Image: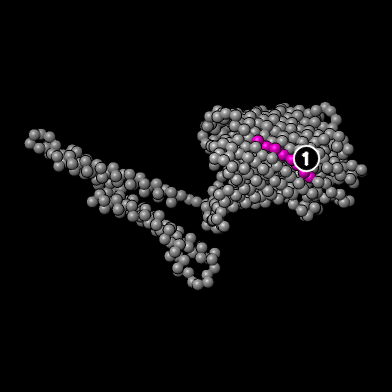
């Protein structure tokens, strides 16, 4: 009798697994000749879903019956245990003991099977995000509150990047809290194409636009950050993306600077740009592999606007993409291999009158595990006209000759970080970075703008170098909850002294979902 119960309980579960395997052939055989392949695929998916739902209903019904049977068995066991029937010697009969033991074993087996069915029902009964392609989509992101106590004048109290002169024009010190760095993402998994697994993701925040008075000071506008579409083979990957340039694959760790990565404009090239990238790795030893990346990029560049129309930026005006490449070598196993890399970048920029500038960069990056606890990482670069990528002291060029001629601005910089992973919930980070444009070239453009010739002077026009030091402690008592306390010191150099300084103490509280 026990075997019959188990067979009845397990048969719906078998249907849940067998039905998806058998359904594609059945649905396909029922399609008319010459049917659209896309319609055929949707028909198969729809039929498969119907059969899974039917099997789920059967499983629920069988679960209810099994609960009733288990309750009846428990009552019988209790009755057997409390019966006064004993043999002539005054001890319980052997048949009663055997029957009680069998009943208890049956109840135990039934409880295990019921628990398994309940877990299967819970899994199939979850509410999923559904897309028009019928492939699963996962929502991810982080609710993030960041509070900054700023000492000195800064360009943005929510996300300080540059120290400004301490004059009466801006506040010399502030306390500000914002939720605009909150993140929202969608991750999707698609079908297998040409032997490759397909996937895509998109991430946004609320740091778009410039908040104004009233509620708008703390409210934000949704802004697209990054996006990727992948085709993954065992050792190759094709990517269409909106992301940081591939010559700058790393970033320091900080939850106070999320809207722009940590050390942005202080040695970290980061500007998110449209790219097409191909990556391939070659195994060189049991624990080592060599990586090659090539890509095309549309650098972000200063856009030209005419009322509501967006005009081509200097890189787009050249009628050719930017080119980038990176070579790397990794050795080691686990989550922290030793990795070193070197990259190159080139793009052509076209300006009025007409004039051209060759934008280029050479880079190096590293990630070195010093021990089980400590890790050292960083990047270096040297190039020209790197404002599009997040360098060059916010400038690609400096104007001269009455503003009708432009000179590509030479630039160098980099950053390094020491990470201490003390436990799964506690880590410490110390990082420093600096971006340095060539001051003698900036002097030629004093009094002229940074985006288009003859534009008005901005706080970044005469900036020649920017350095940021940060130290933070990150505590994650739960995988979905984090607290981070951070100290930052920003030093900014203008063409003429004095040097500007600011300090920030910040607290970030995040909830990951």
Give percent across and percent down for residue 213: 72, 40
Q: Residue at x 52, y 57 (%)?
A: 134
Q: Secondary structure at mark 1?
A: strand
Using residue 327 as the reference point, say whether residue 129 is left or right of it.
Answer: left
Using residue 142 as the reference point, say whether residue 85 is left or right of it.
Answer: left
* Closest to the observer, 423 or 510: 423
| Residue 212 in view | no
Using residue 447 as the reference point, say whether residue 436 is left or right of it.
Answer: left
* Closest to the observer, 18 or 138: 18
Q: Residue at x 79, y 37 (%)?
A: 411
Is residue 321 depicted above or below 287 in this figure? below
Please identify the quarter of the rendering in which residue 208 is found.
top right
Q: Is 363 one of the magenta-colored residues?
A: yes
- Dominant SS of magenta comes to strand
What residue sits right under mark 1 in the picture?
Answer: 383
Give percent across and percent down for residue 474: 59, 31
Give percent across and percent down for residue 225: 66, 45
Q: Is 44 one of the magenta-colored residues?
A: no
Tag 1: Cα neighbours inside 10 Å, few (<14), some, or many (≥20)?
Answer: many
Give percent across and percent down for residue 349: 80, 48
Please identify the quarter of the rendering in which residue 444 is found.
top right
Q: Quadrant of the C terminus?
A: top right
Q: Residue at x 40, y 50 (%)?
A: 121
Magenta region: 359-366
Q: Residue furthest bottom?
A: 33
* Closest to the observer, 304 or 275: 275
Q: Residue furthest left?
A: 88
Q: Residue at x 80, y 28 (%)?
A: 499
């Amino acid at each position: 009798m026990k075997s019959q119960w188990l067979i009845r309980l397990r048969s719906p579960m078998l249907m849940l697994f067998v039905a998806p395997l058998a359904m594609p052939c059945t649905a396909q055989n029922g399609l008319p000749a010459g049917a659209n392949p896309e319609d055929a695929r949707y028909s198969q998916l729809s039929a498969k879903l119907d059969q899974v739902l039917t099997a789920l209903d059967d499983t629920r019904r069988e679960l209810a019956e099994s609960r009733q049977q288990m309750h009846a068995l428990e009552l019988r066991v209790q009755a057997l245990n409390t019966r006064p029937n004993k043999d002539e010697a005054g001890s319980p009969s052997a048949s009663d003991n055997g029957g009680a033991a069998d009943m208890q074993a049956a109840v135990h087996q039934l409880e295990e099977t019921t628990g398994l069915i309940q877990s299967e029902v819970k899994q199939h009964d979850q509410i999923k995000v559904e897309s028009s392609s019928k492939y699963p989509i996962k929502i991810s992101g982080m609710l993030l509150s960041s509070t900054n106590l700023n000492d000195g004048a800064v360009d943005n109290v929510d996300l300080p990047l540059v120290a400004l002169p301490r004059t009466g024009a801006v506040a010399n010190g502030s306390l500000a809290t914002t939720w605009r760095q909150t993140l929202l993402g969608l991750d999707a998994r698609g079908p297998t194409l040409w032997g490759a697994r397909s996937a895509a993701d998109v991430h946004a925040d609320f740091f778009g636009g410039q908040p104004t008075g009233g509620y708008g000071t703390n409210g934000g506008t949704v802004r697209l950050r990054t996006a990727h579409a992948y085709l993954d083979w065992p050792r190759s990957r094709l990517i269409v993306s909106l992301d940081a340039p591939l010559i700058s694959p790393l970033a320091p760790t900080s939850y106070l600077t999320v809207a722009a990565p940590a050390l942005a404009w202080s040695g970290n090239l980061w500007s998110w740009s449209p790219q097409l990238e191909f990556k391939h790795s070659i195994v060189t030893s049991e624990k080592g592999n060599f990586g090659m990346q090539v890509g095309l990029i549309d650098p972000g560049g200063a856009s030209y606007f005419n009322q509501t129309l967006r005009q081509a930026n200097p890189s787009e005006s050249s009628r050719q993409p930017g080119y980038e490449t990176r070579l790397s070598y990794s050795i080691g196993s686990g989550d922290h291999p030793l990795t070193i890399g070197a990259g190159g970048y080139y793009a052509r920029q076209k300006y009025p009158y007409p004039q051209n500038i060759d934008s280029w960069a050479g880079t190096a990056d590293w990630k070195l595990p010093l021990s089980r606890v400590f890790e050292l990482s960083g990047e270096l670069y040297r190039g020209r006209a790197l404002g599009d990528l997040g360098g060059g002291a916010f400038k690609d060029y400096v104007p001269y000759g009455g503003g009708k001629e432009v000179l590509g601005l030479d630039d160098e910089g980099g950053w390094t970080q020491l990470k201490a992973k003390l436990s799964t919930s506690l880590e410490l980070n110390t990082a420093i970075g600096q971006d340095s444009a060539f001051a003698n070239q900036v002097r030629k453009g004093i009094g002229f703008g940074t985006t288009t010739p003859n534009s008005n002077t901005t706080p970044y026009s005469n900036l020649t170098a920017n350095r940021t030091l940060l130290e933070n402690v990150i505590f994650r008592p739960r995988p979905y909850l984090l607290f981070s306390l951070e100290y930052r010191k920003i030093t900014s150099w203008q063409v003429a002294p004095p040097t500007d300084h600011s300090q920030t103490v910040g607290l970030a509280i995040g909830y990951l979902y």
